[in-house]
């Protein structure tokens, strides 16, 4: 009996395997990387690493592994698709460290992540720049504050403290503050503002990692016949604060801030203060008529588009965060305006048109992030286009009634 050719046997076996097992099993993606300790400058050996997949408003764990003695790790899974977006997470001394991971159409991706040792005693923190927006309308004043907080410890360490890491004080009589920090991909992460030992004192517990952390604080206050008094403080030195006042007709009286022309972003008055010591009172008095009615949609759209300018005075790390705070601040006013608008009939042509625009904008944002993560787009161009898309999204949301977003959210939420 003649023995079959071995090459033919293997070929037939391969054909059988292809039919027995789906192709994705052979097309498993691969994400490899290296984790180092930025404090000790050594590889992070035997460090637990999680592969997470954000999807449908949730974060699912795809796989878990540990680094080897040299700090290296590998994930190989059929769930790692070429266009899917993942997050790597390593937790070290009660602090989570994340890095985006995406194959970008390739068979594998290389992602490096740095972790740091933690301390509970406050390091010498410093605010390199801050921006305050004071906006008066009707009988209310809304204050939005952005702080570029820097942890420049050497060797670098993360600051964690259950009693609070970022501390701040507000004038008495204002509303409880809303606080967020700029997280991964500049997404705002809401924080609980814990009251301190004295009225007006607050803190958050967000771990302050080495480098830059953007902290955003927003609150409202009544505007009386005596005007409004800004009297806030932080226990850190501040190199420079820019104060933007809307409307520009408001008279500002302050021993701290000096006029510096008009602000191109808001159209209001711009003032500057420099070289504040820790605990210095950030004070200013405001008097005069406020805006009596909401601005027109055209003016709002123009303001948002101007904010997309990438050459902001606060630098690239704060561009996205300032726009996000604007979005966040608009939320209160928009929600009030929605209640006065007529509802769009469910399934009607207007609703479908708005939903299509919303889908296209969200898809464009996702595609833009994919290109940047894959290294196929320069950083400057990425930020410019991303902010332009977000500006268009702001305008679309402001024109949309609650029925649209409620319907859209209901259909896209996991069941």
Image (cartoon, rainbow, N blue to C red):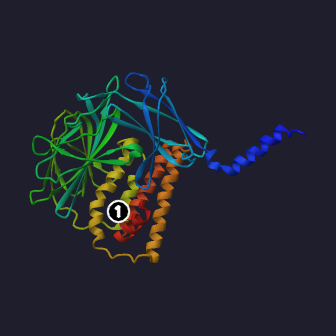
Which residue sits at x=14%, y=59%? 223
Res 153 → quadrant: top left
User: Residue 275 at what x, y percent from top left?
Assistant: 23, 34
Evaluate whether residue 136 shows in this view. yes
Please indicate whether residue 389 sits to the left or right of residue 213 in the image.
Answer: right
**Quick one: quadrant of the C terminus?**
bottom left
Q: From this viewpoint, is residue 311 visible?
A: no
Which residue does the image show at 56% across and 49% down from the upper left?
Answer: 83
Furthest-right residue in view? 1
- Which of the image's four quarters has the N terminus? top right
Position of residue 362 relative to residue 92, above or below, is: below
Q: Position of residue 243 (x, y in %)?
A: 25, 47
Classify residue 350 by image quadrant: bottom left
Residue at image x 35%, y 52%?
A: 324
In-front residue for pair 155/36: 36
What secondary structure is found at the residue carrying circle 1? helix
The front one of 247 and 388 is 388
Q: Is residue 337 above or below residue 288?
A: below
Q: Position of residue 28 (x, y in %)?
A: 59, 43
Query: Foreground: 322 or 163?
Result: 163
Give the residue pinned by disc 1: 300
């Amino acid at each position: 009996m003649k023995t079959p050719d071995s090459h033919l046997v293997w070929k037939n076996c391969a054909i059988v395997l292809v039919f027995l097992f789906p192709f994705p099993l052979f097309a498993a993606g691969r994400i490899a990387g290296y984790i180092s300790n930025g404090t000790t400058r050594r590889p992070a050996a035997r460090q637990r690493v999680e592969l997470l997949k954000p999807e449908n408003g949730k974060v699912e764990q795809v796989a878990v592994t540990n680094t080897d003695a040299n700090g290296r790790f590998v994930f190989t899974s059929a769930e790692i698709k070429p266009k899917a977006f993942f997050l790597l997470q390593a937790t070290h001394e009660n602090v989570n460290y994340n890095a985006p991971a995406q194959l970008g159409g390739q068979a594998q991706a290389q992602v490096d992540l740095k972790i740091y040792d933690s301390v509970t005693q406050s390091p010498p923190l410093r605010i390199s720049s801050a921006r305050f927006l004071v906006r008066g309308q009707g009988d209310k004043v809304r204050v939005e504050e952005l702080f570029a907080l820097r942890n420049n410890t050497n060797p670098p360490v993360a600051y964690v403290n259950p009693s609070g890491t970022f501390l701040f004080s507000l004038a008495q009589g204002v509303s409880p503050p809303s606080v967020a920090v700029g997280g991964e991909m500049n997404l705002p992460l809401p924080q609980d503002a814990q009251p301190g030992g004295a009225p007006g004192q607050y803190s958050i517990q967000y771990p302050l990692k080495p480098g830059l952390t953007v902290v955003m604080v927003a609150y409202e206050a009544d505007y009386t016949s005596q005007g409004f008094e800004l009297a806030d403080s932080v226990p850190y030195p501040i190199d420079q604060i820019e104060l933007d006042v809307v409307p520009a007709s408001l008279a500002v009286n302050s021993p701290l801030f000096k006029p510096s022309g008009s602000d191109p972003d808001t159209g209001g008055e711009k003032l500057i203060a420099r070289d504040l010591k820790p605990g210095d009172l950030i004070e200013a008095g405001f008097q005069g008529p406020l805006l009596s009615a909401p601005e027109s949609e055209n003016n709002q759209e123009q303001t948002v588009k101007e904010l997309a300018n990438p050459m902001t005075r606060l630098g690239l790390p704060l561009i996205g965060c300032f726009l996000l705070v604007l979005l966040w601040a608009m939320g209160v006013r928009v929600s009030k305006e929605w209640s006065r608008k007529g509802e769009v009939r469910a399934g009607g042509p207007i609703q479908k048109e708005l939903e299509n625009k919303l889908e296209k904008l969200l898809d464009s944002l996702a595609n833009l992030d994919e290109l940047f993560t894959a290294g196929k787009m320069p950083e400057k161009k990425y930020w410019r286009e991303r902010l332009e898309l977000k500006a268009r999204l702001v305008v679309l949301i402001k024109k949309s009634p609650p029925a649209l977003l409620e319907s859209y959210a209901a259909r896209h939420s996991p069941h």
